[in-house]
């Protein structure tokens, strides 16, 4: 199975998600912030990235560098990544307008509030989003 990607600036949260992904039989691609992720996107877009591409992205919204919705927006412009499910997570409350804008304008598939749900609920949510997105291809 292809890895799932996690972009999170909080080390503890990033490590927990990485362990969960691996426990669920997925590899984990991890990025510490938006700038690191944008450098990777540059490599993918230019054809200089030779590794495996992720099958799903779970990203924090507010972090140093580019925010999760900005990364999502950019991913939707890269042919190799434009069809993967993108899930954002945030500890901040979003207005309905902000939420709708991220989904409509940035190509986000789902937004999860922090603290994250328990392990099985999170797995069911991500698996469901992944299955729905894959069936639309």
Image (cartoon, rainbow, N blue to C red):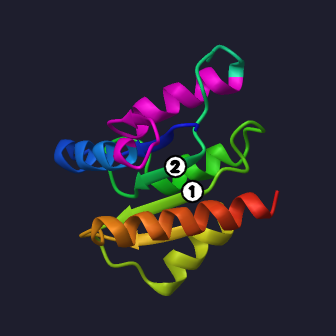
Q: Judge whether residue 109 can be spotted in this image.
A: no
The residue depicted at 30 percent of the width and 64 percent of the height is: 119
- In the picture provided, is 100 more to the left or to the right than 132? left
Picture quarter with the C terminus: bottom right
Judge the density around disc 1: few (<14), some (14-19), many (≥20) Cα neighbours within 10 Å: many
Examine the structure image and report whether residue 32 is included in the region drawn in magenta.
yes
Q: Which residue is mark 2?
A: 57
Judge the density around disc 2: few (<14), some (14-19), many (≥20) Cα neighbours within 10 Å: many
Picture quarter with the N terminus: top right
Which callout, 1 or 2, points at the residue further toward the start of the chain? Answer: 2
Q: In which image quadrant can residue 136 be found?
A: bottom right
- In the picture provided, is 91 more to the left or to the right than 137? left
Residue 24 placed where, x, y %? 41, 49
Front one among 65 and 45: 45
Front one among 136 and 100: 136
Residue 60 placed where, x, y %? 37, 55
Q: Which residues are magenta?
A: 22-45
- In the picture provided, is 46 more to the left or to the right than 116? right
Q: Which residue is mark 1?
A: 86
Examine the structure image and report whether residue 90 is included in the region drawn in magenta.
no
Do tag 1 and tag 2 residues touch (Cβ < 8 Å)? yes
Q: Is residue 34 above or below residue 40?
A: below
The residue depicted at 42 percent of the width and 33 percent of the height is: 35
Secondary element at image label 2: strand
- In the picture provided, is 51 more to the left or to the right than 133? left
Residue 67 placed where, x, y %? 43, 51
Q: Judge whether residue 71 can be spotted in this image.
A: yes
The residue depicted at 63 percent of the width and 44 percent of the height is: 74
Residue 21 placed where, x, y %? 39, 46
Residue farthest toward the right in the current orientation of the protein: 137
């Amino acid at each position: 199975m292809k890895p799932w990607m996690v972009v999170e600036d909080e080390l503890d949260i990033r490590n927990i998600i990485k362990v969960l992904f691996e426990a669920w039989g997925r590899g984990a691609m991890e990025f510490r912030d938006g700038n690191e992720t944008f450098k990777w996107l540059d490599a993918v877009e230019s054809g200089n990235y030779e590794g495996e591409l992720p099958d799903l992205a779970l990203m924090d919204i507010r972090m140093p560098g580019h925010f999760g919705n900005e990364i999502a927006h950019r991913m939707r412009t890269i042919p190799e990544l434009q069809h993967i499910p993108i899930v954002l997570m945030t500890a901040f409350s979003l207005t309905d307008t902000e939420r709708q804008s991220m989904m409509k304008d940035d190509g986000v598939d789902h937004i999860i509030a922090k603290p994250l749900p328990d392990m099985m609920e999170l797995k069911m949510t991500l698996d469901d989003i992944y299955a729905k997105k894959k069936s639309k291809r």
